[in-house]
Image (cartoon, rainbow, N blue to C red):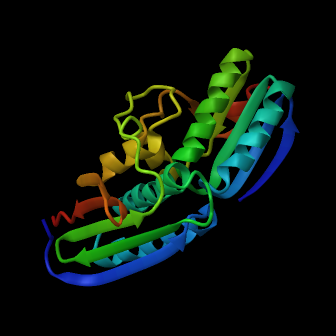
Amino acid sequence: MTISTREVGRARIVEVDGDVDLGTSGDLRRTLFALLPQTPILVLNLGAIRYIDSSGIATLIEVLNDSKRLNKEFVLFGLSPAVEEVFRLTHVNRIFRTVRTEQEAVGPA
Amino acid sequence: MPLGITVLLVQLMLASDARYLPVVRGTISALTAAIGWDDSDCRAITLALDEAVANVIRHAYHNRPDGVIELRCRGNTDGLEVTMLDHGDAPDSVRICAREVGSDQVGGLGTHIIREVMDSVSYQRTESGNLFMATKRLRRT
């Protein structure tokens, strides 16, 4: 799994490529928790994630809960069918703000 | 109860190290495709069994990488039977519980996935160790 980040307007975009599982979700968790206090809008691109397990979903829930506490926005976009299936299986699709494109996630310039 | 005639038997013995989870996924993915499930079901079964192995790594061996996990998958004409044996701590019955649907709680997701995907799931403490058993029946249309 590789993680890269960039800024678009007020948002920080996090790009993840590869598998998010028990062995890699800790890296994703550390990255997201480090960035969350630094930006009003944290955006995660899930488009290049080939696989995500419950430890990855748990990481996203933890970040979402912390974003609410810090009054930040945490937005997901680019969910592949494989990732959407895991969201459905774990019944978490309604708790996240998910959009289709980066532009929708970031909002108006 | 055994399902059908055995057509494939795959046995993996692996260390309790999360680095080997991709090997488990690759094996289960190929096995389920060969038995005849569609892509969506293959992904779901692979996820469920990956979660079962990950649970053993986390909860039986507490992320120690030197434990042994024995995974046995019997593919047959009617579906898949899986047994997994480990020699770590016994499963905590409180952890093996249903998770509230749609909640923002972090715990219990893996167990929820396993129960949601597989047709039958059981956990036993035996003289040989902790035994996980699960089946998934192939539904022909």
Residue at 42% in and 35% down = A91
* Residue A96 located left or right of residue B99: right
Residue B105, x across and y down, in percent: 50, 28
Q: Residue at x 58, y 69 (%)?
A: B20
Residue A49 coordinates in the image, percent (x, y): 62, 55
- Left or right, B81 with respect to B65, comes to left
- At a point 39% along the width and 32% down the height, the residue shown is B99
Q: Image height check: is B40 above or below A69?
A: below
Between B105 and A71, the one lying in front of the other is B105
Residue in front for this viewpoint, A2 or B118: B118
The residue lying at 15 percent from left, 70 percent from top is B3
B115 or A52: nearer the viewer: B115
Q: Which quarter of the rendered picture does the N terminus of chain A lie within?
A: bottom right
Q: Is residue B72 visible?
A: yes
Quadrant of the rendered image containing residue B82: bottom left
Question: In the rendered image of this protein, does residue B4 appear above or below residue B119?
Answer: below
- Quadrant assignment for the C terminus of chain A: top right
User: Vertical placement of B5 versus B116: above or below?
Assistant: below
Q: Position of residue B36 (x, y in %)?
A: 28, 73
Q: Give how far across and how far down residue B127 sits, in percent.
A: 32, 63
